[in-house]
Image (cartoon, grey):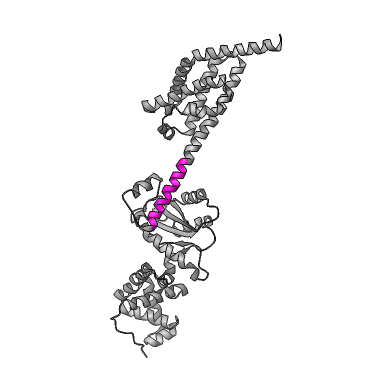
Amino acid sequence: MTTGDRRSTVVHSKEQTLAWLKTVTGELATATLKRLDDTLPWYGDMPPGRRSAVGLVAQAGITSFIHWFDDPTSTPWIAADVFGAAPRELLRSVSLTQTLQLIKVTVEVVEERVKGRDETLREAILLYSREIAFAAADVYARAAEARGLWDARLEALVVDSILSGEYDDELPSRIAALGWHGHGEVSVLVGTAPGMLDVDMLRRTARHLDADVLIGVQGSRLVLVIGRAHPTPPDGETTAESTLVPFMDIATALEPGFGDGHLVLGHEVPSLVDASKSAKAALAGFAVARSWRNAPRPAFADDLLPERALAGDALARSTLINRIYRPLQAHSTELLATLWCYLDNGRSLEATARELFVHPNTVRYRLKRVSEVIGWDATGARESLILQAALILGSIAEPDAAPRRRRR
């Protein structure tokens, strides 16, 4: 047989195969749907409308294979031919894994039906199944990329709303759309954005510590809104409470994801609605953190209250007055006077005792009571600076108060 005769035979065989395939298209589609119903539980649990859409995809795949078998150069159109019949919401309800299962079942049905026929047809089915699998992956990858870009823009919008404190009725729905799993307390962490931001690493680290994060980049700053993934248990359940990871420990674990420079953690607030207060404190602390030599990384925004107050932060001034000066004044003027005298005398117990005409142990006891009342220890160098700033601002806030007199 000559070469021309063999080519004529091959062409004739392909035309016969194409004609046969067109006659069994409906049979293959019906067999595929039955196999899907028998082997894939998720297909049987679908609503009728979505099952019909999946059936259209399977039938479009068989029809597209016939066209491709006739003209293999049509490969670039596979995704449009097959997935164009599916409604947009089908991509949201059917995962990539389920789509690949659908392709596998369809290919198995076609292979069984064409078994024993031309070997070229079997090879074509294997090649086409590979192309359709890659096309499906490409469709889902593009959808995921578009969804990821939208989520990133939405997340940036939510973080901007939190930083500015400008909430509206749509904020809760936006947060829910981002898949926020935080419950209860929230804290805001502010630092320098790295050259290459690894968002996935930050999220994995937070999930490992039973927390969730909202991430926003503002110029050279990286802002993280941190929320615990589990609500705080009711009072009395000390065992459950002990499992909650402190926000400072979470911030320390997230620290490698930030760039060089200072890192400041805002104070803890009850809920995401109040996160703007923690954000303002963290931003104000970050702005003045360079004035604290050897500042820890991360540092509490409340440890930078003196620097923030000197920089004109009204929140820092009110915090110093309302959390230190006024509680001491309301509790005992004796404790307030002892603290002031102790700080004025360079934190010397003996000098304070001489000025107050008391024993040094009495001074120690009063300073211990001061720490119990306000939570700051006057014997520490950094905390004494915070207390000194609180006393100065508190006295300025009461201009009508009688001037202090040194006892001699």
Q: Quadrant of the C terminus?
A: bottom left
Question: Going by the picture, which residue comes out furthest to the top?
Answer: 1
Q: Quadrant of the N terminus?
A: top right
Q: Residue at x 36, y 71 (%)?
A: 317
Q: Residue at x 33, y 85 (%)?
A: 404
Picture coordinates of residue 52 (x, y %)? 40, 24
Picture coordinates of residue 99 (x, y %)? 48, 30
Against 350, residue 181 (above or below) is above
How many marks the image carries: the answer is 0
Q: Quadrant of residue 30?
A: top left
Against 22, residue 183 (above or below) is below
Picture coordinates of residue 206 (x, y %)? 47, 51
84 horizontally vs 272: left or right: right
Against 283, residue 123 (above or below) is above
**Residue toward you, 363 or 314:** 314
Looking at the magenta stretch, what is its main secondary structure? helix
169 horizontally vs 81: left or right: left
Numbered range of the magenta stretch: 146-163
Against 371, residue 347 (above or below) is below
Inspect this view and state whether residue 316 appears: yes
Q: Is residue 157 magenta?
A: yes
18 horizontally vs 189: left or right: right
